[in-house]
Amino acid sequence: MARRRKLYEGKAKIMYEGPEPGTIIQYFKDDATAFNNQKQGVITGKGVLNNRISEYLMTKLTEIGVPNHFIRRVNMREQLVHEVEILPVKLVVRNVAAGSLAKRFGLEEGTQLPRSIIEYYYKSDELNDPMISEEHITCFGWAATQDLDDMVTLSLRVNDFLVGLFLGVGLRLIDFKLEFGRWYNEHDEVQIVLADEISPDNCRLWDVATNEKMDKDRFRRDLGGVKEAYQEVARRLGVLPEAGPMDLKGPKAVQ
């Protein structure tokens, strides 16, 4: 088993030092969390499925000119990605009222919004990822005005593309979370790029015909069939692993 230096471990992924300078190995875990880590569980095979789904979606976004950190998939659980400076701001794009938006404004879940809404959240587990405004972001230096403009522009492009892509396989994109980072290319030029992952872990996806939830809400709300829902998303996208979402242990880490 290869030994790599662990750089960071989050709720759903582990980051290892990559084989070349400026690269990172992103390992997808089976761990599932909700409500700021208050609810925890393990969904066997989830990491394999999310790796394949995110690879597919990031590749499609690259094809339409959306810059992102993805380089290639290494194996069933790992991706090679560019090392980026992650910005401490999450963007949530909402197309349909669900989750916290429905609760905050007393909307019936499933209500189509007049237009897509972008919300900002500060990345902080200790503070429970509070919602923030553009004023907070620029005042505290979490991102420059131009950075924020780039993030919003990219988010809207990603949303437009993914809405159509998922609709083509019978899924309704309700909302999703995006993270961005600064990438310093070989010419030392700085570019804002999409990072993290795009999968049923951070997208709400409903079946068009039945409104059945096909995402992590099945775990959050104890609906059962979480792995089966993720498998169905992968199947519809045409990326279900041939061998099934079997376990593949990660490399041993050296500190």
Image (cartoon, rainbow, N blue to C red):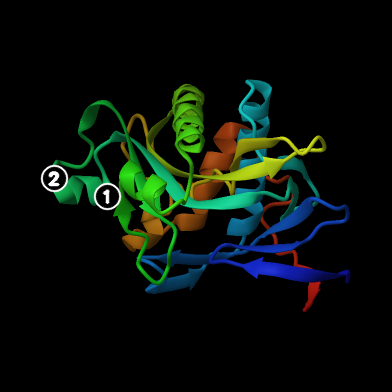
Query: In this view of the protein, can residue 191 be seen by the observer?
Result: yes
Q: Residue 105 got which mark?
A: 2
**Residue 217 vs residue 77: left or right?**
left
Report the amino acid beneath label 1: Gly
Q: Is residue 240 visible?
A: no
Which quadrant holds the N terminus?
bottom right
Residue drawn at point x = 38 percent, y = 55 percent:
218
Give the residue at mark 1. 99
90 vs 76, nearest the viewer: 90
Q: Residue at x 23, y 29 (%)?
A: 113
Measured as percent of width and height from the top left, residue 200 is found at: 49, 47
In this rendering, position of residue 32 left or right of residue 2: left
Q: Nearer the viewer, residue 107 or 116?
A: 116
248 vs 33, left or right, is: right
Numbered disc 2: secondary structure: helix
Name the quadrant containing residue 177: top left
Q: Residue 155 at what x, y percent from top left?
A: 47, 32
- Name the residue at 67% across, 28% down: 62
Q: Residue furthest left?
A: 106
**Secondary element at tag 1:** helix
Amino acid type of the residue that numbered disc 2 sits on in the rendered structure: Phe
Vertical position of residue 12 compared to residue 136: above or below: below
- The reply to whether discs 1 and 2 touch (Cβ–Cβ < 8 Å) is no
Query: Which quarter of the image is occupied by the C terminus?
Result: bottom right
Query: Who comes first in sequence, dot 1 or dot 2?
Result: 1
Image-quadrant location for residue 60: top right
Give the class, few, some or many, for how many residues have Cα within 10 Å of label 1's Cα (few <14, many ≥20). Answer: some
